[in-house]
Amino acid sequence: MNSMPPATDHDAPDLSRLLGRDYWMVTSTPVDGTTAEDIAALVPEHIAWLLDLEERHLVFLSGPLVSGPDVGPGSGVTVLRASDEAEAISLASADPFVTAGLRTFVVHQWRLNEGSVSMRLSLGRGTYEWQ
């Protein structure tokens, strides 16, 4: 018989310390028939659109999905800093892949609670290391 030590207050997480910050997660799915060539043709315009949103402090995270169920050319996830769902939908609707009819999207309200980010920035060398 395995006996576990009794739980203590030390073992219980302090839930009040969770970040609890809301964002909008956009999951994008290619429309049937979308090819890698279709996506590649619009990548520069798509990246310019994302960098504009990033500069306006509206993109928290973004990138393509590269494997998993139903992943295809143009699959991706973008996490937005939007004031509400309507703004998130409006922003996602302007994605060049969407306006070209190459992909659709779904918007989810997402609450960020836990995680960790580390980065080393060298001011003297002008380099960074993402960990």
Image (tube, rainbow, N blue to C red):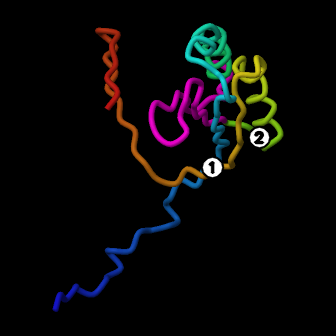
Which residue is at the front of the view, 25 or 130?
25
Give the residues drawn in magenta, as a range: 55-80
Residue 22 placement (x, y as % from top left) = 64, 48
**Which quadrant of the view contains residue 5?**
bottom left
Check disc 2 and report the residue beneath it.
83
Residue 33 x, y percent position in the rendering = 66, 24
Q: For the view shown, which residue lies furthest in the front direction? A: 33
Q: Residue at x 35, y 29 (%)?
A: 119
* The quarter of the displayed image where residue 37 is located: top right
Q: Which element type, helix, strand or loop, lies under badge 2?
A: loop
Is residue 73 in the magenta section?
A: yes
Give the camera-side residue of 16 and 130.
Answer: 130
Q: CA distance from mark 2 to mark 1?
A: 13 Å
Quadrant of the rendered image containing residue 58: top right
Q: Is residue 129 above or below residue 85?
A: above
Which quarter of the rendering shows the C terminus? top left
Q: Nearer the viewer, residue 9 or 23?
A: 23
Give the residue number, with chain letter if any, for mark 1.
110
Residue 31 position (above or below residue 55): below
Callout 2 amino acid: Ser
The reply to whether the magenta stretch includes residue 79 is: yes
Using residue 69 as the reference point, say whether residue 88 is left or right of it. right
Name the residue at 32% across, 74% down: 11
Q: Label 1: how many residues lie within 10 Å, few (<14), some (14-19) or many (20+)? A: some
Q: Is residue 47 left or right of residue 108?
A: left
Taking the spot 43% from the left edge, 48% from the top edge, the residue there is: 115
For the N terminus, which image quadrant? bottom left
